[in-house]
Amino acid sequence: MDKQSIIICILLAIITTNLIRVVPMLLIKGQISNRFLRSFLYYVPYVTLAVMTFPSMIQTTLSPLSGTIALLVGIVAAWRRMGLFPVAIICCAIVYLMDTLIH
């Protein structure tokens, strides 16, 4: 790729990213009062993170079984109000042990 094409691609990425953030602020004036829309917007970041994270947890391990079991144990540990760091350590340990035992 030549230098001009790279600059054009970077500028398009900047414009697209900023339009996504600026247009809603220009179109929506004041507080959003619709309860459904407020709850929808509240959960959008969590759903986006889940959609990006969960498939990766299962597919990047040596065995999909170890990723799935670590995911389930992590959900149970989080449900029992363990912090993010202990849950991550537990999940990593489960994947490591299962991949070591399976392969």
Image (cartoon, rainbow, N blue to C red):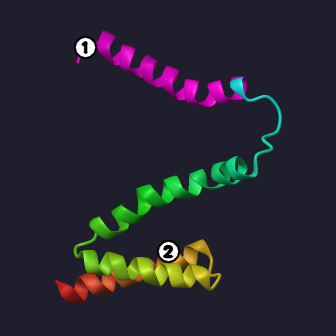
* Image spot of residue 76 (x, y percent): 53, 84
Identity of the residue drawn at 79% across and 28% down? 29
Q: Residue at x 31, y 86 (%)?
A: 97
Residue under circle 1? 2
Was residue 20 drawn as part of the magenta stretch in this picture?
yes
The amino acid sitting under disc 2 is Ala
Which residue was labeled with disc 2? 88
Query: Which element is circle 1 on?
Result: loop
Would you say residue 60 is visible in this rendering? no
Residue 98 in which image quadrant: bottom left
Q: Quadrant of the C terminus?
A: bottom left
Residue 14 magenta? yes
Q: Residue furthest bottom?
A: 101
Q: Up-down: is 96 above or below 43? A: below
Q: Residue at x 35, y 63 (%)?
A: 55
| Percent position of residue 78, x then y | 58, 79
Measured along the vertical axis of the image, is residue 16 above or below residue 8?
A: below
> For the magenta stretch, what is the residue range?
1-26
Q: Amino acid at mark 1?
A: Asp
Residue 88 rendering spot, x and y as whole percentages: 49, 74
The residue under the point 43% across, 19% down is 12
Measured Cα–Cα span from mark 2 to mark 1: 43 Å
Dot 1, how many residues are within 10 Å of its Cα: few (below 14), some (14-19), or many (20+)?
few
